[in-house]
Each structure stands twice: as structure tokens, then as C-alpha cells.
Image (spheres, rainbow, N blue to C red):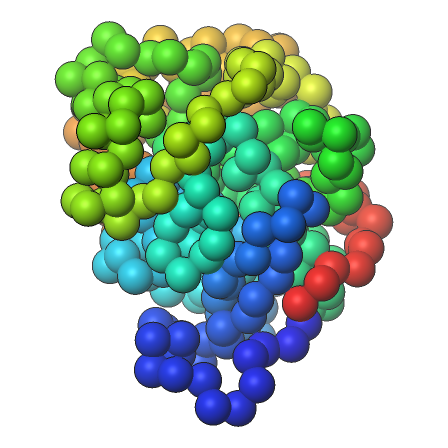
């Protein structure tokens, strides 16, 4: 895993001291601006080195304080690999609201494997949560005719939807407008810096609830706020049921809102411990190479 050549501009420098900026290309040809934060020199537990791949929500990215706070907290217990997902920040491509972002997760897991981490957990927020669920549920098979090559060892989804076309909350009605109309896409670009794919979906992709049953026996944790203004508690319960008996652990967080912006310091500490606990329960997946 190699970083940019000497002469990196100020805009390309890592937002967290000690971090390393990297670039990688997804299976469908999107160039991602990624960050690697090496884990602690002395891990909390002996055994294989562990990393967590973090996928942000719609409108997030490596320039957002909420995500950087989460990454820094997770780094206390494991290596961290994250990126501006497609259509966000310095990465290329256009946002597809969970369809092709599984390719982004796959490329980041590949980066972690190439850095020498034997166990890799994926952790996604909101759109990123849908993406890590789809990535793990579709692992070993093609997505839109292209391979998903880098399987995780454990999966954590925070504030994830169970299904598409959610319009029963004001928050999701605003997001749907941003995704489905020219005026909304302009607003997403100007207000959030998100470049939404104007082509939309050619075919409706399998939703998280459709694929989550294929994730076990990988350890799986679902986290959802009881005051989430975008996705009601229907979603985590539907996902847990579809994972099958014993297939997922569900944390319903009192008072919590939505995604990375709502993660408190106590919850962040619990998530950091969960990364090590879940990855430690899994048999390491076979490592494969990745472009960097």
C-alpha cells in the first residue's frame, strides 16, 4: 500500500496527524481518496492485527469533523482505513446511494489486507451501513458483473436502512428529493458537496434486508438510535429478523439520533471494543492483493 509521491499538496495531506493518504481504484474504475491510521503499537489483545474499514453516510467524508472524531476514537484499538466514498470529497465518480458503494468498501478492505491486517471489520454509517451490509451479503459473487474480492471478517452497521425508497420521515423525503430530481442533485452538490449520479439505478439493487441473511456466520452487529430522524426502529428490527436466529446482535441506543453525527464518546468506546471482539471471533478471511 503506497501513498502519494512527495510534493503532496496541502489539500491532500492527512487530516489526522500520523495518518497516511492513499489512493485506490475500485473494481468499476472509481478512484478513491483514502486514509490509513495505523493501529496502536501495542494492541489491547494479542493475536492477529485488526483493522476497521469505515464507510461514512450521505454527505460525509474525510473533511467532516464527526467522521474524523469517530476515526480517531477507533484508532485507539485497531488500524483504521476510510475514504471519501464515490461522489464525495476528493474521490471520483458519483454517489449511487448504496448501489455501487459496495465496490468502495471492497477496495478499502483490499487496502487493509495489503497493509498486513489479518482481520478486517467493516463499519458503516447510514448509506455506508447499507454498503457494508451489501458488500458482506454479496461477498464471493459479482456485483453488476464485476467481482467483490475482499471479504470482511466482521460487520457493523450503524443507522442503516433495511429497504430502499423510504419516504416516511421528513429527513428521507429530503434525501429522496436530492437523489431523484435535477434540482435536488444541484442542492446536494451545493449544500453537501455530494455529486449524485444523474443516471440513477438502471435496475433496483438488492436491498440490505434482501442480502443480510447471507452474512452469517460472519459476526454481525446492528446499531440504531431510538430517536433516528431518518430511519425508524422498523429497520433494525427487520434487518435482525432477516439475519436469522442468532445471526446478528442488535443495539438500540436510547436518545441517539442518526449516523456518525450522533455517536457519543461512550458509544464510540463500545464500538471500538466491538471491532476487536467481533473480529476476534471470526476465522480470518483469505487475503488478496489490492491496487494502491
Residue sitting at x 45%, y 84%: 8
Horizontal and vertical percent position of residue 141: 78, 29
- What residue lies at 46% left-to-right and 75% top-to-bottom? 19
The one nearer the camera, 292 or 177, is 177
- In the visual, does 32 lie left or right of 113? left
> How many numbered circles does the render carry?
0
Of 127 and 158, nearer the camera is 127
Does residue 244 appear left or right of residue 64 in this picture? right
Residue 279's x, y, as percent?
64, 46
Vertical position of residue 62 compared to residue 30: above or below: below
- In the image, residue 88 sits, relative to residue 18, either above or below, namely above
Q: Is residue 268 visible?
A: no
Q: Which quarter of the rendering shows the C terminus?
A: bottom right
Q: Quadrant of residue 31?
A: bottom right
The image quadrant that residue 48 belongs to is bottom right
Point 61% across, 61% down: residue = 24
Q: Note whether residue 131 is visible.
A: yes
Residue 113, compared with residue 254, is above or below; it is below
Q: Residue at x 19, y 37 (%)?
A: 187
- Residue 210 on image: x %, y %: 59, 12
In the rendered image, residue 35, in percent from the top left (x then y), is placed at 48, 66
Can you say whether 33 is above or below 258 in the image?
below
Q: Quadrant of residue 230?
A: top left
Which quarter of the rendering shows the N terminus?
Answer: bottom right
In this orientation, which residue lies closer to the viewer: 78 or 166? 166
Amino acid at each position: 500500500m503506497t501513498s502519494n509521491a512527495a510534493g503532496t499538496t496541502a489539500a491532500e495531506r492527512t487530516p489526522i496527524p500520523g495518518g497516511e493518504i492513499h489512493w485506490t481504484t475500485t473494481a468499476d474504475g472509481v478512484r478513491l481518496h483514502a486514509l490509513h491510521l495505523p493501529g496502536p503499537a501495542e494492541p489491547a489483545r494479542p493475536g492477529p492485527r485488526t483493522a476497521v474499514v469505515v464507510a461514512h453516510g450521505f454527505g460525509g467524508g474525510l473533511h467532516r469533523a464527526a467522521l474524523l472524531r469517530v476515526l480517531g476514537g477507533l484508532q485507539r484499538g485497531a488500524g483504521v482505513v476510510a475514504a471519501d466514498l464515490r461522489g464525495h470529497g476528493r474521490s471520483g465518480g458519483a454517489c449511487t446511494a448504496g448501489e455501487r458503494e459496495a465496490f468502495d468498501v471492497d477496495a478499502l478492505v483490499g487496502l487493509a489486507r495489503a497493509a498486513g491486517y489479518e482481520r478486517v471489520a467493516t463499519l458503516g454509517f447510514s448509506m455506508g451501513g447499507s454498503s457494508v451490509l451489501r458488500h458482506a451479503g454479496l461477498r464471493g459473487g459479482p456485483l453488476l458483473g464485476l467481482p467483490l474480492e475482499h471479504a470482511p471478517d466482521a460487520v457493523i452497521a450503524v443507522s442503516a436502512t433495511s429497504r430502499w425508497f423510504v419516504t416516511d420521515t421528513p429527513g428521507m423525503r429530503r434525501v429522496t428529493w436530492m437523489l431523484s430530481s435535477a434540482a435536488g442533485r444541484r442542492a446536494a452538490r451545493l449544500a453537501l458537496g455530494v455529486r449524485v449520479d444523474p443516471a440513477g439505478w438502471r435496475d433496483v439493487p438488492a436491498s440490505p434486508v434482501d442480502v443480510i441473511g447471507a452474512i452469517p456466520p460472519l459476526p454481525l452487529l446492528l446499531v440504531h438510535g431510538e430517536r433516528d430522524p431518518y430511519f425508524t426502529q422498523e429497520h433494525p428490527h427487520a434487518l435482525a429478523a432477516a439475519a436469522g436466529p442468532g445471526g446478528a446482535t442488535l443495539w438500540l441506543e436510547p436518545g441517539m439520533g442518526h449516523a456518525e453525527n450522533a455517536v457519543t464518546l461512550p458509544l464510540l468506546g463500545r464500538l471500538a471494543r466491538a471491532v476487536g471482539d467481533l473480529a476476534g471471533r471470526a476465522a480470518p478471511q483469505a487475503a488478496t492483493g489490492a491496487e494502491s
